[in-house]
Image (cartoon, rainbow, N blue to C red):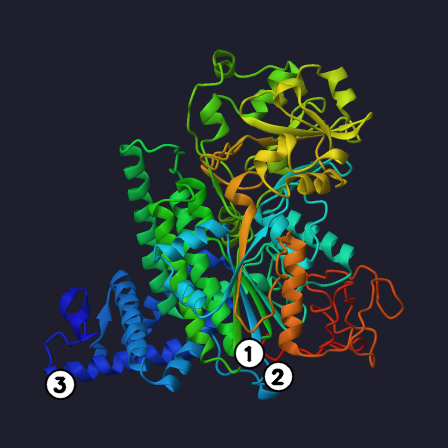
Amino acid sequence: MLLLAGLLPDFRLQSADGDSFTRTALTAATAAGAFGLLGALVWPLIVRALLLVPALVLGLLVFFLNGSLLLVALWLIPDGRGAADPETAVAVAAVMSAVASATSTALAVRDDDAYRRRLYRLTGRTRPRDPGDTAGSVPGTVFLQLDGVGHHVLRGAVADGLMPTVAGWLEAGHRLTPWRTDWSSQTGASQLGILHGSNEDVPAFRWYEKDTGRLMVSNRPASAVELQRRAVRRTGDGGLLTVDGASRGNLFSGGADQLALVLSMAARRGRRNRSRAGYFAYFSDPANAVRTAGSLVAECVREVYQSTRARLRRETPRVSRGGTYPFVRAFATVVERDVVVSAVMGDMLAGRTAVYADLVAYDEVAHHSGPHGRDTEQVLARLDRAIALIATVAEHAPRPYRIVLLSDHGQSPGETFESAYGLTLKDLVRVGCGLPVPRRVRRTRWGHPRTDSGGDSEARDALRSALHRPVDESGETARELPARPSEPVVLASGNLGLVSFPDVPHRMTREEIDRRHPALLHTLAHHPGVGFVLVASAEHGSVVLARDGVEVPVAELADDGPLAVFGRGAARAVRRTDGFPHVADIMVNSMYDPATGSVHAFEEQIGSHGGLGGEQSHAFLLSPPDLSPPVGAGEELVGAEQVHRVLRRWLRESSGPQVPLGQAGTLGREAPLGEAGSLGREAPLGEAGSLGREGAPGPLEISPSAHETESILPAEGPVAPDKNR
């Protein structure tokens, strides 16, 4: 404070006639003490009062409110010796908070007790829960999802020294297990399957439902709520995190009671939206806001520099990265990362049993910069530091923790479909239907390159939620649905395209499509940017169409023929999706070049995922050696639902023998869904999205799935309130 008073002309700690150094120092000590006391006593009340303010607005208000507290502290100095202009007070308060944070960290480095107390303060906690709540001998489990980091990318980052923490774990005996995604290789399908045990009827990232007339988009709050509700109804189970769990930065709650930045909860407004509480817990410490704001600005500058460098070097493939994208990227790589990591730290210090958190930084950057290169390497290095911090905090938790790393999918590089061929998938469909197309499409012959900004991202919609600007479902639907019901709805999910005819209430067959638009299927299947097309058939059930007139009934599909280039498991993935009630009339998967590993995204992304082809289908699971192997020797881990079963098993291993819900007194026998004693019915999500956890106390309305035997919570009776909520 003395230094700032000497540097800033509008900030003084002396009377108008001047004071001795001793008197000035005493004045500074008084002001600093008053400022610290106000911060300790008044700040939590201010944050609680501002709970309805948009989360990121609160992050900006932190600076002004902190400056206001400093003005009050100066006003309390006797004889009016302290004075500052309001804008100067904001700067002084920010610097003081940052210096205080750095100093207290440095002083606590060599003192475990002091470091532990500082961690409690940074995460908004005062102490762990009662020892009886978390027995020290029973380990907890933290699942950290590195969004979009494929198995190949992780191995390369470890080999290149970008992720020393992960490399150390591998050397210590951790198991790195690849797993193969479903056809829809994107976060909505994967995370729904991982957290809730079922991703049935999720054909893509976005799709049109004829029976309801709804456009479903995985990263829209209203759609996420509905997908979670359907999964709970299908499995009869609340989710992976139902028992003393926490969900951080995810699309879905997983049945957790403790929520922060969970998209399926973002549709709720007001004080009951506990998902937004993660922002307030983080920004309740002014030092956090100062540090994050500085990193936010630095990340925006880094993105502008990197995109300018790519443009000057004429790097290809390339998409536009202007507009609001630098801020979206900074939100994903800084704000969301910091808030999620802080929430996970708080969960461990509270001794929670299970935590699942999603770090989206790599996925967001890879969409626009490509999955390989210097831009994403820097993100991977910062993710490793976040993992190291969480591992360090685990050493100070009241119970041991097992940290499991996993990803939901990978990313495949490649030039966009529009850049490669001069028209979008929607343009190509309209050409095949004989509908009007833009003049630029009529001029092109598959080769007019162009670049535009576009696409959608989880970070963009999380940012909208943080700003209290949720997506207008009706407005978005109006923009994406055709003006005439007879025209096709064309949607893109990475390199997977979906074509639906909204005026036909059922899934159209190949014969019906040929009668209406004789050239459409031929145009799609024979285009050089298309790998294969899936369509129903009245004669053959469903068929896969490819170039050179190749036609294979889905029932006869194998991992050779038209799907050979897409690798093992492609036929199974296509066959499963073909059975979904809301599969599109026409499913279009782009081409895949195994020599380069590239695909053509139907969105404006040069790193994409959503369909079949290359690294996007190959995720990873990294587990400590004291957990059982995910699969047996020679077996493969396939599909998000199987990953869910593995994670369930690991939670059982950590918690020991338990009594199945509804079968008290019977150990070791699993209760099939619908059997006597198992509820076997849909439990209402309530307002929290976690069954029976919000509102008036009542019986726990969760029944186990066929593979579940947990019963830490009673089968009957009210749910005990959480003391730390």
Q: Residue furthest right?
A: 676
The kind of residue tagged 1 is Gly
Q: Nearer the viewer, residue 618 or 431?
A: 618
Number of marks in the rendered image: 3
Q: Residue, x 71% and y 28% (percent of image)?
A: 552
Q: Nearer the viewer, residue 430 or 556?
A: 556
The kind of residue tagged 3 is Thr
Instruction: Residue 63: tell me if it is visible.
Output: no
Q: Residues within 10 Å of mark 1 (few under 14, many from 20)?
A: many
Q: Are marks 2 and 1 in contact (CB under 8 Å)?
A: yes
Residue tagged 2 = 133
Residue 351: assigned label: 1
- Look at the image and tell me in which quarter the C terminus lies: bottom right
Q: Between disc 2 and disc 1, whose residue precedes?
A: 2
Q: Quadrant of residue 295?
A: bottom left
Q: Between disc 2 and disc 3, whose residue precedes?
A: 3
Residue 118: assigned label: none
Q: Position of residue 540 (x, y in %)?
A: 80, 28
Residue 22: assigned label: 3
Q: Between disc 3 and disc 1, whose residue precedes?
A: 3
Callout 2 secondary element: helix
Callout 1 secondary element: loop
Q: Nearer the viewer, residue 40 or 177?
A: 177
Q: Residue, x 80% and y 69% (percent of image)?
A: 670
Which of discs 2 and 3 lies nearer the camera? The answer is: 2
